[in-house]
C-alpha cells in the first residue's frame, strides 16, 4: 500500500511539473533530496554510534533496568504489549529521556533502536502494532523541559539569552498538552475495532 502511495505521489509530481513547464525543477528537487538523504544518513552514523554505545553501557550497568523499574507503573499502562524487561522498553525510556531534555539528535538513534526492538515483537511485519503507534505518538509530541535546539536557534539569529530562555515555560505547557492529547488520541483509536490487531504474537513473546 505504501509503495502505491509513493508511486502516485511521484507520478502526480512529474505530471504536474510537466504541465506547468517545471519538469527541470522537479528533476533538480529529486536530485537535491537524494543528496540530502545521503548526507543525513552519513551524518547519523556518528551520532548513532555514540548514543547506542552509551545505551549499551547504561544497559550493562543496570541503569536501564533501574529506570524501567522506576517507570514501570506508567510504562506498563502505556505499553501493555511490551514485556517490562524487554530491550524495547529500555530504548523507549532512553528516547523519552532524551526528548524531555531537548536532545533531539540523541533521541533519533534511540527512537530507531526502539522501533527496531518493537518490530521484533511484531508478528505482522507490514503492520504497525499498538505499541509502535503509541511510541510514535509520544515521540513526536514529547514533553520537552529544556528546548535546547530551539534556544540555540534563537541565539543564532541574535536573541539574547533572556529572550531565548523565555520559551522554556510555554514549551513545557505546549508539549505537555500535545503529549496528553496524543496519548488520549492513540489509546482511543486503539479501541476501535478497525484498528485492533491479533495479539497472539505479542502474548507468545511475553509468555516466553
Image (tube, rainbow, N blue to C red):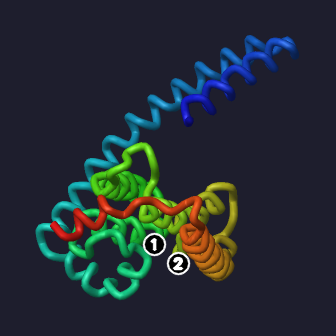
Q: Tell me the quarter of the picture where residue 89 sits.
A: bottom left
- Ranked by sequence position, the earlier of labels 2 and 1 is 1
Residue at the (86%, 14%) spot, across then down: 19
Residue 4, given in percent of the width and then of the height, sits at 60, 29
Number of disc labels: 2
In the foreground, 171 or 78: 78
- Do the residues under discs 2 and 1 have CB atoms within 8 angstroms? yes
Q: Nearer the viewer, residue 202 or 160?
A: 202
Q: Position of residue 120 (x, y in %)?
A: 28, 53
**Residue 21 location, quadrant:** top right
Q: For label 1, count other residues whose C-alpha is less than 10 Å away and answer few (under 14), some (14-19) or many (20+).
A: some
Q: Nearer the viewer, residue 176 or 105?
A: 176
29 sits to left or right of 119: right
**Residue identifier under label 1:** 101
- Disc 1 is placed on an element classified as loop
Q: Residue furthest left?
A: 60
**Quadrant that contains the N terminus:** top right
Residue at point 32%, 51% (across, down) = 123
Residue 145's tag is: 2
From this view, report whether residue 7 is shown above or below residue 1: above
Please give the name of the residue rendered at 31% of the width and 44% of the height, measured from the top-left corner. Answer: 46
Point out residue 33 in the picture as x, y percentages from the top left corner: 58, 27
Residue 97 visible in the displayed image = yes
- Residue drawn at the location 65% of the way across and 79% of the way down: 177
Using the rendered image of the protein, determine whether residue 168 is visible from the camera's viewpoint.
no
Left or right placement of residue 198 versus residue 145 in this view: left
Secondary-structure class at tag 2:
loop
Q: Relative to 124, is 138 on the left or the right?
A: right
Location of the C terminus (image quadrant): bottom left
Amino acid at each position: 500500500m505504501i509503495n502505491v502511495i509513493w508511486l502516485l505521489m511521484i507520478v502526480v509530481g512529474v505530471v504536474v511539473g510537466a504541465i506547468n513547464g517545471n519538469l527541470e525543477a522537479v528533476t533538480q528537487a529529486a536530485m537535491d533530496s537524494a543528496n540530502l538523504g545521503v548526507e543525513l544518513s552519513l551524518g547519523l552514523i556518528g551520532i548513532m554510534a555514540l548514543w547506542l554505545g552509551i545505551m549499551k553501557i547504561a544497559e550493562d550497568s543496570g541503569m536501564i533496568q533501574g529506570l524501567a523499574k522506576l517507570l514501570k507503573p506508567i510504562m506498563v499502562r502505556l505499553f501493555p504489549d511490551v514485556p517490562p524487561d524487554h530491550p524495547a522498553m529500555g530504548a523507549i525510556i532512553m528516547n523519552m529521556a532524551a526528548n524531555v531534555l531537548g536532545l533531539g539528535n540523541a533521541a533519533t538513534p534511540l527512537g530507531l533502536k526502539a522501533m527496531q526492538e518493537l518490530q521484533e515483537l511484531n508478528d505482522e511485519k507490514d503492520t504497525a502494532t499498538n505499541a509502535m503507534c503509541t511510541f510514535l505518538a509520544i515521540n513526536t509530541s514529547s514533553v520537552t523541559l529544556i528546548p535546547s535546539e530551539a534556544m540555540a536557534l534563537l541565539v543564532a539569529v541574535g536573541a539574547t539569552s533572556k529572550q531565548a530562555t523565555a520559551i522554556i515555560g510555554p514549551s513545557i505547557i505546549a508539549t505537555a498538552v500535545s503529549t496528553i492529547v496524543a496519548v488520549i488520541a492513540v489509546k482511543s483509536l486503539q479501541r476501535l475495532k478497525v484498528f485492533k490487531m491479533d495479539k497472539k504474537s505479542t502474548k507468545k513473546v511475553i509468555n516466553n
